[in-house]
Amino acid sequence: MDRSTFSIVGNSKAKNMTEKIAGILFLACGFFAVAAVIVITVYMIAKGTPALHKVGILEILFGTVWSPTSAEPSFGILYIILTSVIGTGMAVLIGVPVGVLTAVFMAEVAPPKLAGIVRPAVELLAGIPSVVYGLVGLLILNPLMYKLEMWVFKGSSTHQWTGGANLLCAVLVLAVMILPTVINISESAIRAVPRDYKMTSLALGATRIQTIFRVILPSAKSGIVTAIVLGVGRAIGEAMAICMVAGNSVNFPFPFSSVRFLTTAMVSEMAYSQGLHKEVLFTIGLVLFVFIMIINLVLNRVMKKGAEDGNKYR
Amino acid sequence: MLANKIITKDLDLYYGENHALKTVNMDIKEKAVTAFIGPSGCGKSTFLKTLNRMNDLIPSVRIEGTVTLDGEDIYSQGVDTTLLRKKIGMVFQQPNPFPMSIYDNVAYGPRIHGIKHKAQLDEIVEKSLRSAAIFDEVKDRMKKSALGLSGGQQQRLCIARALAVEPEVLLMDEPTSALDPISTLKIEDLMAELKSEYTVVIVTHNMQQAARISDYTAFFLVGEMVEFNTTDEIFARPKDKRTEDYITGRFG
Amino acid sequence: MGTNTVSLYTKRRRLSDGILTALIYLCASLAICLVAGIVGYVVVRGVRSVNWTFLTTVQSSKNNTFGIAGNLLNTLYIIVITLLIATPLGIGAAIYLNEYAKPGKLVRMIEFTTETLSGIPSIIFGMFGMVFFGTTLHLGFSILTGALTLTLLILPLITRNTQEALRTVPDSYRNGALGIGATKWYMIRTILLPSAMPGIITGVILAIGRIVGESAALIFTAGSGYILPKSLFGAFHKILESGGTLTIQMYLRMTNAKYDDAFGIALVLLIIVLGINCLTKFLTKRFDVTRLDERRGKQKRVKTKVSK
């Protein structure tokens, strides 16, 4: 290269061009997620609202009769919403304590070797496809639940028999499915608690168990709340695993009733629905979407607050 | 002459292969302040932690010899370490309040030892905070987070928390090393008051502090207890050459 | 409390401690039993169905046989197409967030939407994919529609893993390359991406796991076709045809009460999941080792500098 003529001022336009294009392409990639969320939101609203106008918001959201294909169709989805809310609540009520205690086991109680057995098991639990949970639930849980149902409602003449496919069954499947999420997030939250707290508590004469439940878990609170919120999100959005085991008829969500969730309503009817019926299914999708967005906002809040609390300690 | 509270006999401690404490024999007197001095890594903190068995939490530690509290061997089988640690409280180097309210921090100990009655807890909390000379500063914000206090206040809160379980002995591991001079002074004054009721054992890297506040002083060097005597004797007439060198600042 | 009278040897009973310890052990063993139970049940019931015909043929009512070859192929198609689209997008987004963007509103917005995307349930993606890719873009029920839908689903996974990997690349690498006059894009291409590769690959493998197990997002987008292509043209055209993955076929067999077939597919799925878990574990272990070496290398360089 001729050194004397070498200038640092813009000698290579092609190089600059490549740089610029690369920068713009990366920016576009970054914006893809933003665009995707906007488009999804717009579509969900555009597809979900027409039925609200045609049928009426109150009739859809607070109606209790779901008979979309009858001569005089009725599109009340209150029971479907309630099923999702109550089912998710019950699943979290079962799954979270079990998950948090398992996390305590792995982080605080178990010798490393034993924790080394539980961890891959939890990872496998997370990897099992929804449909497999559905299949196992259908063939193991349903018969057991049927026996329980027969025992509980022995001689009852008013009970509507479900053959074991009921809310309780779906709740148990959901509780198992949120376990890996709850365990993983709680475990890292517990591990992030400063060791000082543990030492101090022990030095005050607390036992290991007292230390875990009175200092470590309260200190890991924001992480555990995150785990709960993520668990709620996972449970309310699950479709395939529970559509086999929940019985799939629209009823008020009593434990032994055959029920339909927001998600299972979409899975089971989308294929044959037409016209207004299909539009109402999109409204159901919109309701679920609104729930998920609320959960996302709560999650954002919780994580931000957790980060602030962490900073305050440091 | 004061009575002996804690007596260690031929105490050896190993971290794996490392011989960290070598045949320590010491009589710690009741209701007095005993200070451990020595350069970093000399074993003074390790020795302090053998007195309430905090070293048990480290898997590779092995201990030989005996430590007795009021005549009972604290390392014999059947000793409930939670009871031991209730009798022998500890304050750490870094102020480390729990992320809870000031009240809950102090009430933590009494609660784990089974006190549930609100009035009784209130009484203990106030008494402990007064003993730690911090009550007036926090009485209006008992329900606020303890993490909002200054470093010196946090350390006095930690002392109050340790006092709330009504220990007989208070171990303090360099309690002022993370604090500013004024907070340090406050805690030193506090120790002088505490010894009327408690047996206080303090580890310090600050010789002047040991001279100011303690009645007895032990000098440690590489795992060995070189000399142990009344503070006046140690500082005025050290018997061992190494103690003299350390006190006069020739090393360490 | 009369502390002086209490001996250290006093036995204090702690009923609550005992109960809580028992509960902790109970929960942990419950997790293990669940996994063992589910896996064991699937293996026992599935192993009879899995044989050569099962793996290499498609469903045939004439021979009255069932096979999953078509579904295996569809799954493979969807994995490949989804990754072809999502991997560059995800890596690009991560590079933008880590290397180009200045911290601020824009970054927060991209990160928030990425987080949101990972929280949206599969069934919503399924509905959206059906109306957007299927109807609006006229792709119908096809493997391409399914793959595009899954792209949205796995994008956050790849973005986040790449970001993590980029964060572990020490700044000295960047400065070193830029300091000798490399352009930013050249530095990214030759220094950053190779260093971050193990992390990126881990993300891709996790994404494969997600795709293999996915069902709700595919049932209304990719459809349920199971026929094998008969010619080279057919192999290409297949992208625009309906194609059900293993999970979809499993769901359909289940709803038709063909439980033995369903368990056979479940077993195949479990084996794939187990393989993916082992692979990620292996990779993360190796990843840590290489990072350690890098740190050692860095220290060495610093030392030689000092000695000069």
Image: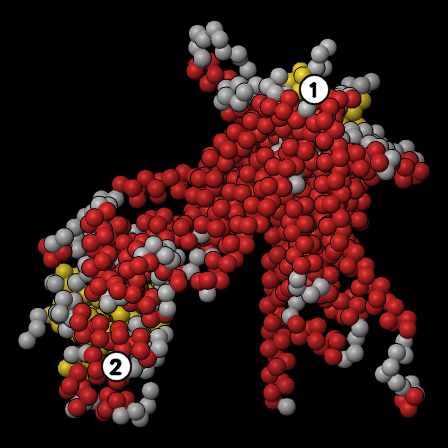
**Chain of the residue that carries numbered disc 1 in the rendered image:** C
**Mark 1: which secondary structure?**
loop
**Dot 2 crowding, Cα within 10 Å, few <14, some 14–19, many 20+:** some
| Residue holding disc 2 | B209
- Residue A312 location in percent, x, y? 46, 62
Q: Would residue A120 be found to the left or right of residue C65 on screen?
A: left
- Residue A71 location in percent, x, y? 73, 10
**Mark number for residue C241?**
none
At 62% from the left edge and 54% from the top edge, which residue is drawn?
C282
- Residue A300 location in percent, x, y? 58, 50
At 62% from the left edge and 39% from the top edge, which residue is drawn?
A292
Q: Nearer the viewer, residue A236 or C192?
A: A236
**Mark number for residue C256?**
1
**Mark 2: which secondary structure?**
helix
Is residue C279 among the parts visible in the rendering?
A: no
Q: Nearer the viewer, residue C158 or B239?
A: C158
**Chain of the residue that carries numbered disc 2 in the rendered image:** B
> Is A132 rendered above or below residue B154?
above
Amino acid residing under circle 2: Gln
Q: Both on one chain, marks 2 and 1?
A: no
**Dot 1 crowding, Cα within 10 Å, few <14, some 14–19, many 20+:** few
Q: Would residue B34 be found to the left or right of residue C123 on screen?
A: left
At 64% from the left edge and 90% from the top edge, which residue is drawn?
C308
- Residue A45 location in percent, x, y? 72, 36
Amino acid residing under circle 1: Asn
